[in-house]
Image (cartoon, rainbow, N blue to C red):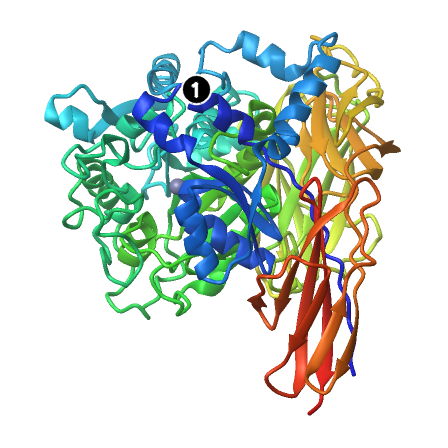
Amino acid sequence: MKLTSAMMLLALSVSTSYATTQSHSQLPSDVASTTNSLKTYHILADSAQHSYQLAHEYHDALIDRQNRFVTLLLDEHDADKLRERGHLVVQVESKQVLKNQPYLQQALQQKTTSKLTRSTKLSNLNESAGIPGFACYPTVEETYQQAQNIAKRYPQLASWRSIGPSWQKEQGLGGYDLNVLVLGDNSKKRKKPKPILFMQSALHAREYTTAATTLAFANYLVDNYQSNADAQWILQERDIHILFVANPDGRKQAETGVLWRKNTNENYCADTPQRRGVDLNRNFSYEWFAIDNGSSGEQCDQTYRGPVAASEPEVQAIERYVRSLFEDRRGDLPTDPAPLDTPGLFLDIHSAGGMILYPFDTTYEPAPNEPQLKQLAQRFAAFTGYRAMPAVDLYPADGTSLGLGYSELGVPSFVFELGRTFFESCQDYQQEVLPNNLQALLYAAKVAGTPYITPQGPEVLDLRISGAGSMAVPQGSELTLQAKISDEFLLAPDNGPIEAGQAIKKVRLRVERNGKKFGKKVKLSPIDGVFDTPEEFISHTLDTRYWPNGTYTFIVQAQDRDGNWGVKATQQLTLDNNAPAPVSAPEANFITECVYGGCALTATKEPTQGDALTYKWYINDSEVPLHGPSVQFWGLKGTQTAKLEVENNYAQRTIVEKSFEMDGPVLPVTNVSYECEKLSCHFDASKSYDPDGSVEFFVWRINGEYLSSREAILEYEFSQAGEQKVEVAAIDNEYYLSVKTLLITVNE
Ligand SMILES: [Zn+2]
């Protein structure tokens, strides 16, 4: 007999319920009456992968996804349908859901109002008023205004053009143009055309974070063009085309707080106007309605594909434009790969769920370029903390933008699913979604030259000139060039380990002064003296005593033992003998303020004019940091650790790490014993308990089938001898649960 037990830990963290509740009060009355019958349910998942599938399948009802369950807003009919399909469906009191993140955010807000945090400063300074209740997300009009301002302020770097009308505009019912911001410095004549990065966002209207993120990316590039070597290199070497709002009519609906996904075409589902329209991401021509269940033929469904391929003006405009940008590099057979030197990159930015999806989505057959697509997806995952997977692993879909970008044209194409929820709180957007995705988008722009090749090489990460940073310094200042070199900058997928990288072979440094070659190329050596592992650290002292004043660009690139060169990383250095001497390293310290189930961490030193500071927080060894002088996180009762990294604008860094106790919910403890007489077994989970409340009921599952019993004692007769899998979950009064799994063998 074999016996294994596994404790599955579950933490409820529901970030949207506040937004959802708030938005319902703003719904038109006919919608409000239907949403009144909606209730909140947890659907248990077998695995993290399964929870992603559920989240995607029920995206139109999704409130939250955790590795062991998803939280959905459903009516009873839909909940019953899920039960019939064998899912475990637990209804959750909405006040229990409200007890989580939104409640905590408010509680923490009150506790920390005395301090002016960065996010409140930002929203006060923000030129746009934003979507009601979400000041960090500009409206359609504000997005267009900001993009227009970019084109006006930087005419040599940006232009703003219409690529076609929305459905309402075409019909003369108001509406908008679909507008693209084109970024790139094209002042120098070139022999070859520049590689193109195309990205679109808000194709699905309600995905608030997406257009704000791409707009922030555009602003970052132009605002840092003079001072940041990477931004400068990107705009000189790439053309970037951004369609911020791919579905402006639908977006306008979503701005009123409605969970609107499709466009607003009134010809479909006319009898139920709040469900009308076409799902633009099922309306693309390539493999439109090519598979069963890849889209819906029902007009009122959220994935309605439209009557014919590319029936919608938005999709027509996108197809026309994207085909004009990229040459078709892929053959017509599904098995034809695009050539490895194919330039360009196609990104479709969606939310939510924390995923990086790559082709295919119509078939489980791997895409012919799968090894390369997967490698780049895992790089994006490492920047964002998201999971990389083929799109079909979530849910088969047809007529999507991935079909246009990759299947039709052979351009490496990816869908980002940002954050946790459609109406992400501004706190989460600013501390996590935006800063981490910005890094991924900058990386995308850099690799867009040969995106199937360059991600195979090692990455130069966290390159900085400590002692100078972005500031001008006098000759002979104490400066060190520092970086981490990694051939394993990947995030493991849920279903497997990270593939091992190759050892680093070579790291080279090239310096330019005022745009011209300066001195010889330098081979950099690692801190530990020898390149022999896939991850190495560089610390190179710069002797600038005899360097003339001017602006220098440092270009670092690394090669692995297989001969692959990675992406170039660059840093700018300005030597100016009239500049003041660098300030010393910043102080790093923080205070913790906790409420039940959550904490706010606030750095004690705020940034000042002469000493701009950046803050990165790693909570309980998280894969990616949170950002900003004050951050919030949620969790269970117990010891928490937080590492704060403070960097000043001279790229000097101080790190502090602290542990502290947090009060919060405690998981129930599931205990189960059993006795079998041949095929008849008696299971007893009555010794289960909840340290901070009571166990309310149990859920039993045998060999994958849920039972209807909610009792602690279960009598069960197996139909045949052999190994059996028995899972029991104890669920407490706060809907936290822990699962115990038994593998038992019964004999006849
Ligand atoms: Zn979407």
Residue 451 visible in image? no
Q: Residue at x 23, y 37 (%)?
A: 277
Q: Is residue 167 left or right of residue 322?
A: left
The part of the image, by quadrant, that contains residue 85 is bottom left
Q: Is residue 59 left or right of residue 439?
A: left
The part of the image, by quadrant, that contains residue 613 is top right
Give the position of the N terminus as an image quadrant. Answer: bottom right
Figure quarter occupied by ligand 1: top left
Residue located beneath label 1 in the image:
25
Residue nearest the observer in this picture, 43 or 412: 43
Measuring from the top left, give residue 218's x and y in whole percent.
Answer: 44, 26
Measuring from the top left, give residue 347's x and y in whole percent.
Answer: 40, 43
Measuring from the top left, give residue 741's x and y in whole percent.
Answer: 72, 66
Rendered position, 747 above or below 122: below
Q: Residue at x 45, y 64 (%)?
A: 370
Residue nearest the observer in this picture, 178 or 194: 178
Give the position of the C terminus as an image quadrant. Answer: bottom right
Measuring from the top left, give residue 83's x and y in whole percent.
Answer: 48, 57
The mark tally for this picture is: 1
**SS for callout 1:** loop
Q: Residue at x 80, y 53 (%)?
A: 669
Circle 1: is it few (<14), some (14-19), or many (20+) Cα within 10 Å? few
The part of the image, by quadrant, that contains residue 483 is top right
Residue 12 visible in image? yes
The kind of residue tagged 1 is: Ser
Rendered position, 478 above or below 499: above
Q: Residue at x 23, y 65 (%)?
A: 332
Rendered position, 594 above or below 407: above
